[in-house]
Amino acid sequence: MKIDWVALGTVFGVSLTVTVALVALFTLGIAGLSRHETATEQGGSAGLARSGAYACFALCAVAVSYGIYLIVT
């Protein structure tokens, strides 16, 4: 049995990169919702923060759905 270490390293690197990017994107969504709440409490309007947060969450959902698609097919 021969292990292809280059392929294993590539899979590890891509998995780590995608995981960190997905967590960062989700964190940006949480931060956007937090800014929206803060602006609402202060009487302002922060529609852009809410829209950005929803866009981040949508991108997270797309990435997770694509990952599930890759696993299933």
Image: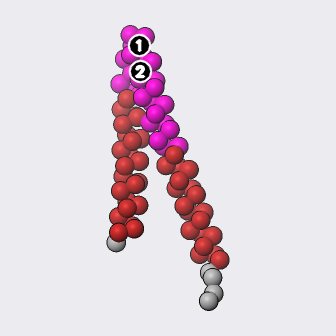
Image position, residue 67 (x, y; %): 41, 61
Residue that appears at 35% across and 56% down: 65
Residue beneath disc 2:
37
Image position, residue 44 (x, y; %): 39, 13
Residue 72 shows which numbered tag? none
Residue that appears at 36% across and 32% down: 51
Q: Amino acid at mark 1?
A: Glu
Residue beneath disc 1:
41
Q: For residue 56: magenta?
A: no
Residue that appears at 39% across and 67% down: 70
Looking at the image, residue 17 lies above or below residue 24: below
Q: For residue 35: magenta?
A: yes
In this picture, which residue range is highlighted in magenta?
Answer: 24-49
Q: Nearer the viewer, residue 7 or 48?
A: 7
Secondary structure found at label 2? helix
Secondary structure found at label 1? helix
The reply to whether callout 1 and callout 2 are in contact (CB within 8 Å) is yes
Secondary structure mainly formed by the magenta segment: helix
Res. 52 image quadrant:
top left
Looking at the image, residue 33 lies above or below residue 71: above
Looking at the image, residue 73 lies above or below residue 68: below
